[in-house]
């Protein structure tokens, strides 16, 4: 249905209401406020806090924040990525590769979208707290 809205075939709009408010919350909550967080009322906020404690960041982002992956990353944090001008010796690198084949559709052809896969090659040098290169 979202693709039909984007192509203006039908009228509609997407409203995302995450469990924890973010910037420009559609309900007017301040960033960081939990959904229906009223201890004297329904107190859904207490339920959400409990679920957040027992749920992985990836699952929390997907199920409760309306994002399939947390903004800060799930496996690799942006702060860990360091540029390098010269590659270290291959013997001290641990190399990992990954691809995402659920890329955003580029073109439409009879209800089938052509997507572009996204691939990345990472190398970890030394201890995990040292350097991570892309």
Image (tube, rainbow, N blue to C red):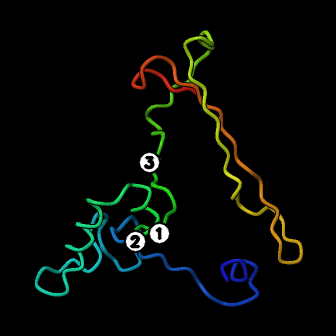
Q: Earlier in the sequence, mark 3 or mark 1?
A: 1
- Mark 3–mark 2 contact, CB under 8 Å? no
When the figure is inspected, residue 75 is found, relative to residue 95, above or below; the finding is below
Query: Residue 18 has which mark?
Result: 2
Left or right of residue 2: residue 36: left
Query: Residue 66 has which mark?
Result: 1
Q: Residues within 10 Å of mark 1 (few under 14, many from 20)?
A: some
Circle 3 is placed at which residue position?
72
Q: Indicate the position of residue 125 as horizontal and vertical percent values.
A: 51, 19
Q: Residues within 10 Å of mark 3 (few under 14, many from 20)?
A: few
* Circle 2 SS class: loop
Q: Indicate the position of residue 83 as horizontal and vertical percent values.
A: 56, 24
Query: Residue 26 has which mark?
Result: none
Q: Earlier in the sequence, mark 3 or mark 2?
A: 2
Q: Indicate the position of residue 90 as horizontal and vertical percent values.
A: 63, 13
When the figure is inspected, residue 104 is found, relative to residue 121, above or below; the finding is below
Gap in Å between the C-alphas at discs 1 and 2?
A: 6 Å
Left or right of residue 77: residue 12: right
| Residue 51 picture quarter | bottom left
| Residue 22 picture quarter | bottom left
């Amino acid at each position: 249905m979202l693709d039909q809205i984007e192509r203006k075939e039908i009228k509609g709009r997407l409203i995302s209401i995450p469990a924890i408010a973010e910037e420009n919350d559609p309900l007017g909550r301040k960033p960081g406020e939990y959904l229906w967080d009223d201890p004297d009322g329904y107190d859904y906020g207490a339920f959400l806090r409990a679920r957040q404690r027992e749920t992985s960041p990836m699952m929390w982002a997907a199920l409760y924040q309306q994002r399939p992956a947390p903004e800060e990353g799930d496996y690799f944090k942006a702060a860990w990525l360091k540029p390098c001008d010269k590659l270290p010796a291959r013997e001290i690198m641990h190399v990992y590769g990954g691809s995402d084949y659920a890329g955003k559709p580029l073109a439409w052809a009879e209800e089938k979208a052509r997507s572009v896969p996204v691939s990345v090659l990472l190398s970890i040098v030394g201890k995990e707290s040292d350097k991570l290169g892309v």
